[in-house]
Image (cartoon, grey):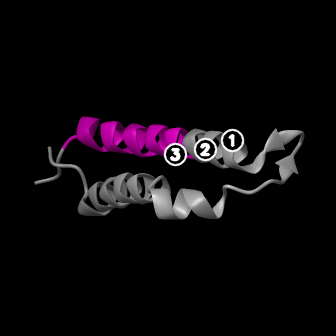
Amino acid sequence: MRPPAKLTERALVLALTAFLAWIPPLVGVFSLDGFVFGLPVLFVYFFAGWAIFIALCAWITRKLRQSAQQPEDI
């Protein structure tokens, strides 16, 4: 069974967003001298973004797997 187009599009958008989130011009915006909870802003940006993208990938993958296991209505 083919996954729903909506989920496939979300997976593509998530991959593109993850790619664009770490291009050098955008990373330069977060290369500040400040600290968040005692950590440099750049580290927080990288690791918080990474954790968010992993969680979203897990959610989309779970939905795609569930849709693939459902029987197709004819």
Could you tell me what secondary structure mostly forms the magenta stretch?
Answer: helix
Q: Residue 16's quadrant in the figure?
A: bottom left
Amino acid found under the numbered disc labelled 3: Phe
Q: Indicate the quadrant containing the C terminus: top left, top right, bottom left or bottom right.
A: bottom left
Left or right: 4, with 13 as reference point? left
Q: Earlier in the sequence, mark 3 or mark 1?
A: 1
Name the residue rendered at 36%, 52% in the picture.
15
Q: Residue 65's quadrant in the figure?
A: top left
> What is the tally of numbered marks visible in this picture?
3
SS class of the residue under badge 2? helix
Q: Mark on residue 43? A: 1
SS class of the residue under badge 1? helix
21 vs 4, nearest the viewer: 21
Amino acid found under the numbered disc labelled 2: Phe
- Mark toward the viewer: 3 or 2: 2
SS class of the residue under badge 3? helix
Q: Earlier in the sequence, mark 3 or mark 2?
A: 2
The magenta span reads: 52-71
Q: CA distance from mark 3 to mark 1?
A: 15 Å
41 vs 17, nearest the viewer: 41
Q: Residue 24: x, y in percent?
A: 47, 57
CB contact under 8 Å: marks 2 and 1? yes
Q: Residue 68: x, y in percent?
A: 24, 40
Residue underneath mark 3: 53
- Residue pushed farthest left? 74
Q: Residue 1: x, y in percent?
A: 14, 44
Relative to 6, say whether 39 is above or below. Answer: above
Residue underneath mark 2: 46
